[in-house]
Image (tube, coloured by chain):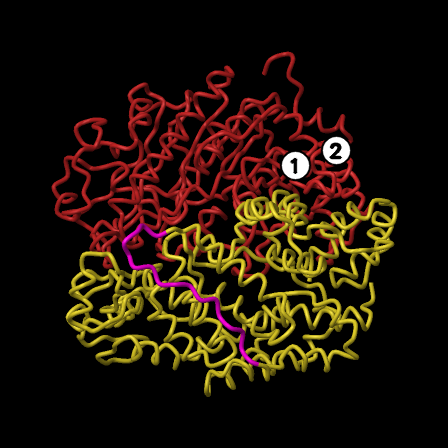
Amino acid sequence: MPVSARERVAHVVRRLSMAPHAAIAVDLPDTDAAIARALDLSGAAATPLAMAPPDGSAKPDVRAIVEPIAWWLERMQQADRMVEERLTWFWHDHFATSVVKVREPYLMNRQHLTLRTHASGNFADLLKAVARDPAMLVYLDGITNAVDERNENFGRECLELFTMGRDSGYTQDDVVAASRAFTGWVVDLPGRPFSPRLERVTGVQPWDSVFVARRHDAGVKTLLGVTGQFDLDGALDVILGHPATATFVARKLYRELVGLDPDDAVVASLAKGFARDYEILPLVTEIVQRPEFTSDDAVRAKVRTPVEKLVGIRQAAGGKSRPGGGAVIARALRAMAYVPFVPPNVGGFPKGRRLLGPGNLVHTFDLVAAAGTAPESHDGAGALAALGVFDVSATTRKVLDEQRDPQQRFALAVASPEYAVT
Amino acid sequence: MSGRQVSRRRFLTGLGVGATAAVAAGYGLTVWGDGGAGRASSSAGRRATPATLGGRDDRTLVVLELGGGNDGLNTVVPTADPAYRALRPTLGVSNAIALDDEIGLHPELAKLAARYHDGHVAIVEGIGYPDPDLSHFASLGYWWSGVPGESGGVGWLGRYLDGTVGAADPLAGISIGPVPSPALLGTQSFATSIADASGLQPTLPAWVGGTDGGDVDDLVAAWGGFAPASPDPRTLMGEVQQAIAHTVLARRGLDRDLAGFRPTGSTSVTGSLALAARLVASDRPPRVVYVSGLGDFDTHQGQAQRQPVLLRDLDAGLDSFFATVEAAGRADRALVMTVSEFGRRPGENGSGTDHGTAAPHFLIGSGVKGGRYGAPPSLTALDPHGNPVATTDFRSLYATVLAGWLDVDPFAVLGRGAGFGPLPVLT
């Protein structure tokens, strides 16, 4: 099926944001304008969700995570600073951290703000911020990593998932060296027995992370062939200096935005520029200005995630949400392993064709509850246009046109093949 | 198989599934691939499995994946080994349920221990693979593919399904968990994935007609219309269309198999195992059920608090699973096998344990010759990273169930290799 000009513009908007933004997409003249619109970060940053820090006297209430989830899903629909939404989600998936282990929604919200702050900024700054982020220190056990009790969890995942990637030349010895360098960071968890003394000795504020020198392994380490008395930032600088890191991140971001596997030469060129200063927005800009990004092959090359589907449904319905739909949606997202702040493991959310299992496909219907009522439509094309889909196959059009009830037509449009991809 | 039972294949052919499912031939791989995240599979991944393996279709293999890497050392405890107590000064289990004078089970596995004493549990010790990789994702990939060093392609059970049912039966292999298990990924076969114990039942708001089950069925029927007669397999859209057609067919079959089933169980473990039990007890049992999402066994920290909860849920889930299949008179049809990407390191890291290598696994069912197989790895001759050296290749575990339970040539599925073969576990 040839790609229409309108679908191509909608493609740009979808890939560079977390929502279809159908009303905006139809007004943009071409893909250049769509790229400029999505990358426009000139407006004020979103006012973050303020969560009061718990005083530690009560057990953490994990269910309070619904507050940042609701805030985030609402934010994804907004039409300003679009690319920040795409990148904030990308980094959450990249630095996957789950409230199921962290237990404290307040810390998850703080991590979210860290990701959001650095989303389009500098990867080296982002990495260093995440490495000392309280939620991450709890999630990958940095807080128990000490000179006499080394814990390899963060060290291994940092090399494998956050920076260099698998089969890029590091060994188990490098995992150990990095883990040693990362020792000494703890989080002041109010209510825990150690908290008052930690605050007295270090001056740390409740819920902040702090470096405790006597827990740190100050010895000499050899990491990736470089020898020194590395601490956290020192080790991260060595890792950032390894060419595999820029290559891994550039390739992953290319796949996220373009939806295709890049040629090695393209990755090498992107990585060379990225490695110079690790600035994220210039890398994004370079990727999306490549011809592949707007090529026919890239359009609808990705499987749409449940979160993207949900945000599109809410946007199509004008953001109205039917009271009571929340429980159904939460159950569906849980069943599909797609609850924000609850990635199934440190590898992030399932992606690609693993989202096309029968269980996942039927639960797409459940997400319709997010609409409250179907947006007005007279035919199948209209129902899909509300969801930001403009090129429709003859088969899909026929099924939707035959459906007389507009509510059922909308439900079918949500579960259509066209809306399953992006 | 009793006379009133219809073979699954005949049943599905009667529904007209055979003809449509044949269209699925060749789609399995592309529909379930992981989107390019892993390394492409090489020789074994592309190895064509002849659809001539035969095998039995009246028994079910239920695989339980303990994701994250279960600590085998505290699951099957070497109670008599002084090295164990030295390596586990704080996390060591001191009140294991004795199975003999060498080993005991974790105290939260009391029902499993009773089943062991009844002779229905085989413990295979020291399972791993050569040149261990301590990455979750690499190691899981090898366990899924059944080929050490290879991940991202066809799964070992996908190859089994390719060679036995091919595209004829989408309910011969069922995956329970939030994402389809890559172990079931085949080139011709198409296994069905069920996200949770609710089966393949959508929930629609009342304004779409969700309160009336008939409307849901009508809507799902209309949904099936999205798949054209011959979707283009070269496009992602074509794959989606085929997956929708497949889902509609699978749902129709499951409606029969699960008629009257209401999900029970207070945890995802008990819920998933209740669903698995019901599938085993149906008139058309699947050949394979693969259950994942059974908890986070990656106990780097807080292991003394976390592992007991995980094992307690597992023990309760297994007990209710066997209670259901025994009550249905189908105890002789079910074999449960545990898998996990690796064991954990014998040495403690403080309050937990890091990624390790060899671990014991269980084969459970009335067809099992209970007892101990394989060999416990030495705790005094650890590898340079402080991990035990495996004594038994994980493909021996696979070969055991392929040959002894599913009744196919294990080497046609796993390839021929030195160092592994079936263990004499199954009668």
Residue B416 percent coordinates (x, y): 47, 43
Q: Is residue A148 left or right of residue A227?
A: left
Let me know if residue A56 is in the magenta part. Answer: yes
Q: Residue at x 58, y 46 (%)?
A: A332
Q: Magenta part of the protein: which range?
A: A44-60
The quarter of the image holding the N terminus of chain B is top right
Quarter-wise, where is residue A11 in the image?
A: bottom right
Q: Mark 2 is on which residue type?
A: Val
- Chain in yellow colour: A
Q: Is residue B122 left or right of residue A356?
A: left
Let me know if residue B363 is in the magenta part. Answer: no
| Residue contact between numbered discs 1 and 2, judged by CB atoms under 8 Å | yes
Pointer 1 local density, CA inside 10 Å: few below 14, some 14–19, many at least 20: many
Quarter-wise, where is residue A6 in the image?
A: bottom right
Q: Chain of mark 1?
A: B
Q: Mark 1 is on which residue type?
A: Pro
Kindly identify which numbered label has been placed on residue B170.
1
